[in-house]
Structure formats: structure tokens, C-alpha cells
Amino acid sequence: MALLQHPWPWYVAGPLIGLFVPALLILDNKSLGISSNLRHLCAALAPRVSFFRYEWKEAGLWNLIFLAGVVLGGFIGGNLLAAPAVAISTATHADLARLGIHDFAGLAPRELFTWSSLLSVRGLVLLVAGGFCVGFGTAYAGGCTSGHGIAGLANLERPSLVAVLGFFAGGLVATFILLPRIL
Amino acid sequence: MTTTLAAPTRAVRYGPRDLALYFLLGVLFGVVLTKSEAVSWFRIQEMFRFQSFHMYGILASAVVVAGVAIALIKRYHVTTLRGEPIAITPKTMGRGVRYWAGGSLFGIGWAFTGACPGPLFALVGSGVTVIVVPVVAALAGTYAYGWLRPRLPH
């Protein structure tokens, strides 16, 4: 139990994540891809646009159930097996402190990721605009870190490589140009 | 030898046991994402600042393990548990606009929220309840894409 409570190193977590690709394929030809669920949820809730008019239960019920499991997994990993503060590098700690972040407890900084931060411009930008970009971007690109970054790259697909380069281009612009102006 | 059988109707495909299995796999996925801190805004900042190998190690080792597994599946014509051939439909490149434009937009959202779609849901479960807001915003974003799709270059 004590061992489980430590954060898992990359060489444990990465291979475990990689194994989901063959496991889902062998189970029933399913492709690992979390962002498809955003489309399935839109299809289930508001199928008013042709992009969302399809049999979402046939295409994605398995994936939505998987996603429900991810929520419970987050509860288990974040509570029952909770680790102390994330041990980020001293360089990152210093950079973030310079941006005005001082509470390094938890998985996300409490100064930014609490309900009351929705009353501030920076909170709205990070939570609402950020979330919107995640949903719009993954739907446009046809995948996220799991579908393109892991399953697509593992299958040596060039579109996924372009998408991953895009992820990093956007992430670097946000980190080095946008965040210093927002925080 | 291939035997031609009537294609099973899709409805038959999800028995309660299948769904329980997908749920269990999802739980495991969520635990790994959380325990490896891939759901942490701090870790994502560290990644985009190139100040630690942690996230790169996770992504690279996941790709290598999945890649070797896919190569073996193709090499030995591994079938699914139902005995069907494993087929991965490759994505079409087209003009490629959707991949770099959509990818970059997602990258901005990843840095802002500190989470990609899987971690967003895992974070809600872990107790960072305000992440419900980016989840709803992500649904709105996906919906907006579906609406604008005929007018966007792909």
C-alpha cells in the first residue's frame, strides 16, 4: 500500500498506458481515444448538427463506460492512493513562483483551480477558454493525446505526428506567450 | 481458414460483462493517469518548459510499448477475442490542416487547463470539482466544431 501511495515513475506508468492499445484492439477492435467521448456526449445530448447524428450507443457506449471508469480511477488515485505534493523540478517551481503561484499542494494549483477563481479573468480564461480549446481542438484534429499521441504514433501514422507537433506548438505558445500575460 | 458467419448485430456486442470490463479498464486507466501525475497542471507546465523527463518518458514509453504490440499483432495476424481480424483504420492526411490547426488549438487548451481529455475526467474524480467547468466548456467546443465543420478547412 505504501508503495502504491508513492507517485508512479514514468517507466511504470508509460508502459501500462501503452498496453491499453493492444488490450482494446484484442478485446474487440477498439481504438484507444478519449476525446471521441466528447463527440459521443454531444451526439447523446444534442444531435442537432449532422456531425453528431449517428448511433452513438453503437459507436461509443463502450468508450463512455470506459470514461466513467476513468472518473472512478481518478477518485481512487487521487484519494485512496493520494500522494503528497507533486514533486516538480526546482526550475519549474521557480518559474511558476515568478508567475505568482505559491500554493504547490495538490494536483492543480488552488490559486487557479477553485470555484471562486471563476470570478477572475485568469480563472475564466484557464477554465472556460482552456476547456473550449480542448474540445474544439481535439474534435478538429480528430484525436487527443491518447488517440493521436499514443495510438496514432504507435501505428506510425503521419497525421498523428502532425497533430502531436501541433499539440506542442500550441502548448509552447500558451506557456511562454499567453500564460505570462494571463497569470 | 476463414469461415463466413453472419455478422453479429452491434446490439449483441455490449453485454453487461463487456461493459463491466470496459469500466474496469477505465478505472485502471484513471488510476495510472492520476498516480503518474499526468493529470497535474504542474507536470504539464514542467513538460512544456522542458524541465523534466517525466511526461516525455510516459509518452515515449507508452508509444514504444503500443508500437511493438501493434507490430506483433500485424506480424502474427492476431485476432480479437471474438476471432475477428484486427483492423486499424489509418487516418487520412488530406491537406493536413485539421491536424496542425486542431492540434495547436488543443495544445493551448492542454497548457491552460493542465489536462487533456482523459485527465480532465480523472481530475473531476480526484476531487478537483471545478474541472467540471472545463469539461462543459470542452463539450461546447466540440459542439462548436461540429457546427462549424462544413466551413472549416480540413
Image (spheres, grey):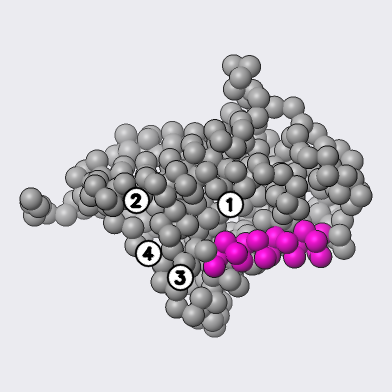
Q: Is residue A107 among the parts visible in the rendering? A: yes
Name the chain under label 1: B
Label 3: element kind: helix
> Does B70 lie within the magenta span?
no
> Residue B71 bears which disc, if any?
2
Label 2: element kind: helix
Q: Amino acid at mark 3?
A: Phe
Q: Nearer the viewer, mark 1 or mark 2?
A: 2
Which residue lies at the image location 19% right of the left edge and 45% below the top edge? Answer: B83
Of residues A25 and B61, the one drawn nearer to the viewer in this rendering:
B61
User: Which residue is disc 3 drawn over?
Assistant: A51
- Label 4 to label 3: alpha-carbon separation: 20 Å
> Does A164 lie within the magenta span?
yes
Which residues make up the magenta segment? Answer: A162-179
Name the chain under label 3: A
Q: Amino acid at mark 2?
A: Ala
Which residue lies at the image location 58% right of the left edge and 71% below the top edge? Answer: B100
Q: Amino acid at mark 4?
A: Pro
